[in-house]
Amino acid sequence: MNASRKSLPVGLSIVSIVCFNFASFISNGLPLAVLPGYVLNTLGFGSAMAGLVIGLQYLTTLLSRPLAGQLADRFGAKRTVMTGLAFLAASGLLTALTFLLPTTPWAGLTLLMAGRILQGVASALISTPSCTWAIGLHGPSRTAQIMSWNGIAAYGGTAIGAPLGVLIRDHLGLAGIGIAITLLGCLPLLFALTRRPAPLLPGLRLPFRSVFMAVLPSGLAVACSSAGFGSLTAFVALYFDSLGWDNAAYCLSAFGGAFIFARLVSPNVVPRFGGYRVVTVCMAVQTLGLLLVWLAPSPLVAILGSALTGLGVSWVYPGLAVETLARTPEANRNSALSTLSLFFDLAVGLAGPVMGLVVSGFGLAQVFFCSALLSAIGLLLMLNLQRHSRR
């Protein structure tokens, strides 16, 4: 009874900090279904420019990851997250001005791209520092629990953001998207003022190159896993269409449902069995799931494979994050996790164009074979990391 009373405030405290990431990912999702049409139909630019406007934010996030980690290590995670929320509010303001001001197409595009750049920086400043803020308050023993809630916030926020953006556009106009992003920066920023900061940890701040090399083995495993997720989201609908199957959306629903289910029903699996061991099992399950999608004789089997892929992906990042923090000096905690996230960003971002080359050369089905092969390589990496950790 006493244990449950003590755990509840800790859980609420974790959620109260992870919620900043939830707000960030909702903001990321809001423009996804809206901006391409505006760039194409209203501003009159081509599809390449529409793709650039969407991709610019993610490229900026990728490039800002190392800086975000170093800032959080030097000045504290709370100050970094609050700076990110301020950037998010500013990006929403620029986005709203794009739709409100009577400007030329090029001026409107410039405002829009400036807003996307600020939103990309904001995402980097909020995402990993939110986790390390909670870890700093509640200790490394809570890392898996914090990462679990953070993953739910990230995937849930993205899932909510895209349809919500369409709803806002239909009822409030395009400027409502920018106003909503501004509110999602300002209101959490006010709430962040009420949360206590995590203590700054003393110690030598390692240069980014040293942190990168230390995280590299785990980062490669994250990339091998994340490439499967990126390929599934990018190509499963086209794969179903090529086979004349319906209900491709159920694959993504099965993936997301299995991912969240695994996070919720097994919150203590990493502390109990160890990160490397759990991730090894996850990579094996993910490999099996992607092979099922590749060889699926029916839509039902492909959906089952997607669910297994979601189960496999679920604990890869938290498990490797726990092991990374255990092997990183505390003063470099933020830099280490930001670097680990860098590999996730790279894998998901490159999955589309790289697997697109596979499609053009070998067909859609081979995308999932290649993804399974990468997952199997990740499994071998994990077995090697396990062997070294025992030594």
Image: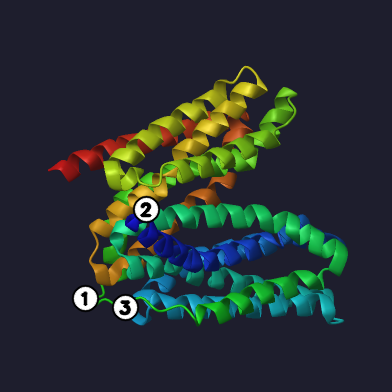
- Which residue occupies the extreme front position in the image? 1
Above or below for 121 versus 161:
below
- Residue that extends furthest to the top in the rendered view of this protein: 297
Residue at image point 18% right, 43% down? 388
Q: Is residue 306 above or below residue 129?
A: above
On residue 199, which mark appears?
Answer: 3
Q: Secondary structure at mark 3?
A: loop
- Real-space CA distance between mark 1 and mark 3, rounded to the nearest whole angstrom: 16 Å
| Mark carried by residue 30 | none
* Rendered location of residue 301, percent (x, y): 60, 22
For badge 1, the amino acid type reads Leu
Quadrant of the image occupied by residue 352 = top right
Front of the two marks 1 and 3: 3
Callout 3 amino acid = Pro
Sequence order check, earlier mark of 1 and 2:
2
Judging depth in this view, the residue of 37 and 126 nearest the camera is: 126
The mark total stands at: 3
Sequence-earlier tag: 3 or 2: 2
Left or right of 284? Residue 201 is left
- At 37% from the left edge and 82% from the top edge, which residue is drawn? 75
Mark 1, secondary structure of its residue: loop
In this view, the mark in front (1 or 2): 2
| Residue 303 in view, yes or no | yes
Given the image, on which type of amino acid does mark 2 rest?
Ala
Residue at 76% x, 55% y is 47
Q: Quadrant of the N terminus?
A: bottom left
For the C terminus, give its image quadrant.
Answer: top left
The tag on residue 144 is 2
Say what secondary structure mark 2 lies in.
helix
Residue under numbered circle 1: 204
**Residue 302 drawn at (x, y percent):** 60, 26
